[in-house]
Image (spheres, rainbow, N blue to C red):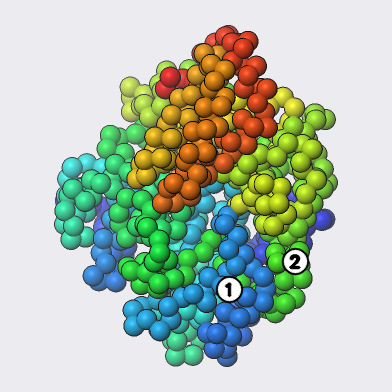
Amino acid sequence: MTFSPELEEKLTGILKVYPPERKRSAVIPMLLYAQDEIGSITRELVEEVARRTGITPLQVDEVVTYYSMLHRKPMGKAHVQICTNISCMLNGGAELWRHASTRMGIGHKEVTADGNISLEEVECMGACSWAPAIQVNYDFYHRMTPEKLDALLTELEGKH
Amino acid sequence: MPYNEPHPLEVRVLSKRFGIPNSQSIDVYLANEGYQGFERTLKMTPDEVVNEVKASGLRGRGGAGFPTGLKWSFLARSSPKPKYIIVNADESEPGTCKDRLLIEFDPHQLIEGCLIAGRAATSNQGYIYVRGEYRYLIDILNKAIAEAYDQGYLGDDVRGSGWKFHLATHTGAGAYECGEESALLESFEGKRGVPRIRPPFPAVAGAYQSPTILNNVETYCAVPSIFRMGGEEWAKLGSPKNGGTRMFCLSGHINRPGVYELPMGFPLMRMIEEVGGGVRGGKKLKAVIPGGSSCPVLRAEECNINMDFDSVAAAKSMLGSGGVVVMDETTDIVAVALRIMRFYAHESCGWCIPCREGTTWLRKILARVYEGHGMVSDVDLIGELSKNMLGRTFCPLGDAAAMPTIAFVEKFRDEFLAYIKTKPVPAQPDPLLQLAGV
């Protein structure tokens, strides 16, 4: 499996930080960084990571099915993650979720027909004092309101 | 400060560099007492380093409050195996957002804490396990680590001392359970994040079955100032047996939510009224979760307590991870209890049956009460089921789900009964219920 030169360099670098006989430690970081480029955890990627870390594809699958950020189906180009956990809920997080879901016509972990935007209701993301918070891919947005969310979604729809 | 204004009542020790332009850079860190604590440890024996931490009264900031110096003294230093320093930056306890700031604004303080732990452990390698969602912090840390290598604070010969210490970041990929130390180690080794049976503890068999010091970000970040000020002076910042300051995360129905560094033992009501500016909209205080979602809720009249590990424990709750969630008189406790249980049911790793089944059934029962289809007997059932989970799991997640739930039904029994007896029918499909899958 071939990756972009940047990702190849990243993956090689990740493998180097663990003791040579402990390559398995690189499994989760390799999967997450590769997913960022490829869009999802494909069969081919599972086999490639297994080969590079010296474990079986089944052992990689065990990991893939455990972690909530690893997806076997592609999410949207902009993956909008809305927190509804306690501090966000007390500040309107659940209403934000409903607002986004109604506007986009998609539910939890669903993707728009054009593949541009996906929604996910997520657990606490560490932004409790600046609630309600959302994350688009890896970027945080604090103290959201339905109006700010609308503006952001419009921008994301135009970008892709 | 990009997040919240500092407050005059704060005692800024760990956060003293927050707000200085370019505070992430090693130059600014060095110009502001950076790496001075570590330089002292180069002339100290490992036992002397451990004893200084013991003298500080520092207790684990991840939530358990175990004395850090004591934890470090348990490390099997005579083992022929390599020793590891692991940082738990998997911050994910609902209500908690402090480690994020400590890394974002002062990554070198964390690196210095790792170096000092490395001296205590005679270790040559550390890893910082960062939750996957905090990708930007990994980038900040990687840059700071590269600067530390450039300036000789990391490498094969740290500051010409002949001591080797290497440090790297490691990303998680979304799992609350990996904040539990033994599950974190499993995850670090490239496996599912399920807890290990202890003993042996990480001090004897941690990363790669080798002796390991594993602490929370804030705990490591406290260490450089201990060595700069001296352990005894640092201890005096706090209350008896609760040394130093604490990063408190104020959230919920409060006028000035934010992360504030206050002395250990700071009164909770002053924290809410003065530091946080009081309950939002002039409403009355109903309840407070004092230390993250795992901690039993306190009714307003129970909030006249000091915020240190022992005082909050005496009030039958926990100081936990420092996440103070303020709830006003309009708060629907049944909704809060359901949301918290949905979280634990989602995050249970499934390894222990009492936790996996218990959280799932509690979620279902709480959902039916919330939906208006509960039975009067459900209130006792919720409490009984929760109590049967206590102490019956390999890791504290089962307890973390049970303890707050017991407090909710015991302290707000009438609200649960009101839901059951009046059966309110929501005007429109409730997003909480849609998502609860009932």
Provide the residue designation for mark 1: B69
**Pointer 2 local density, CA inside 10 Å: few below 14, some 14–19, many at least 20:** some
Residue shown at 36%/27% (left/top)? A111
Q: Is residue A122 left or right of residue B185?
A: right
**Pointer 1 local density, CA inside 10 Å: few below 14, some 14–19, many at least 20:** many
| Comes first in the chain, label 1 or label 2 | 1
Quick one: B382 or A93, which is closer to the camera? B382
Mark 2 falls on what kind of element? loop
- Residue B42 in the image: above or below residue B322: below
Provide the residue designation for mark 2: B240
> Residue B321's spot in the image, x, y percent?
60, 52
> Residue B308's spot in the image, x, y percent?
71, 57
Kind of residue at badge 1:
Gly
Q: Chain of mark 2?
A: B
Residue A150 position by quadrant:
top right
Quick one: B124 or B178, which is closer to the camera? B178
Examine the rendering and report whether any part of residue A83 can be seen: no
Question: How many numbered marks, from 0 up?
Answer: 2
Residue shown at 57%/90% (left/top)? B43
Quick one: A63 or A142, which is closer to the camera? A63
Labels 1 and 2 share a subunit: yes
Q: Is residue B237 left or right of residue A11?
A: right
Residue shown at 56%/27% (left/top)? B380
Kind of residue at badge 2:
Pro
Q: Is residue B2 left or right of residue B162?
A: right
The quadrant the C terminus of chain B occupies is top left
- Residue A139 in the image: above or below residue A26: above
- Residue B345 in the image: above or below residue B240: above
Residue A157 position by quadrant:
top left
Mark 1 falls on what kind of element? helix
Examine the rendering and report whether any part of residue A44 can be seen: yes
What whole-number distance in Å separates the C-alpha atoms at marks 1 and 2?
16 Å
